[in-house]
Amino acid sequence: MIDPAGFRYGIGIILVNHRKQVFLAKRIGMPAWQFPQGGMQGDETPLQTMYRELHEEIGLNEVDVEVIASTKNWLSYRLPHRLRRHHKKPLCVGQKQKWFLLRLTHPDATFNLNANDDPEFDSWAWVSYWHPLKQVISFKRRVYGLALKEFSKLVLGYND
């Protein structure tokens, strides 16, 4: 689903554990780390997309997490020109995402990065709350900062 301005609708997931650490995953074969995210399909709601992506990308199910919050607004970023698929119509210039803050409710939940036939990640780690801002690719950094800041009071007890 792409809006008239060329932004693909999608979701982002910030998963936090009982230590206030967030889940960060490494893209297959690259030194690129990111939060799980993905595009909406058909008539999916953002919440339906989030649960589908949660399972497809890291193998967790609805029973493994609690939804704490979602961003008030859609957060968007533009793809660098070199990453746009100019041969596809309509042209996607970036993503417009609704972000979800989830708490891991089952400490023994098993992460499965191969939960689907086309895995995106080959490694993952629990990291400190603000650490992803140093790791994520530059064109996503602003959106990560906005989402982390919006959720910081819920996770850390303050806005930074």
Image: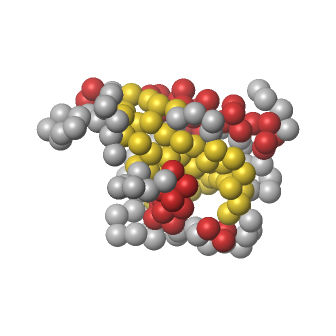
Residue farthest to the right, as pictured: 157
- For residue 32, above or below residue 50: above
Name the spot of residue 13 as percent of width and height, x first.
Answer: 57, 49
Residue farthest to the front, as pictured: 43
Residue at image coords 34%, 64%: 118
Residue at image coords 33%, 28%: 5
Whether residue 118 is visible here, answered yes or no, is: yes
Residue farthest to the left, as pictured: 87
Name the spot of residue 84 as percent of width and height, x first.
Answer: 26, 34
Q: Nearer the viewer, residue 86 or 129?
A: 86
Name the spot of residue 124 as percent of width and height, x first.
Answer: 56, 56
Left or right, residue 37 beside residue 91: right
Residue at image coords 40%, 49%: 39
Please say which color scheme the image uses: secondary structure
Left or right, residue 149 beside residue 56: right
- For residue 17, above or below residue 154: below
Whether residue 31 is visible here, answered yes or no, is: no
- Residue 92: name its quadrant: top left
Left or right, residue 154 beside residue 93: right
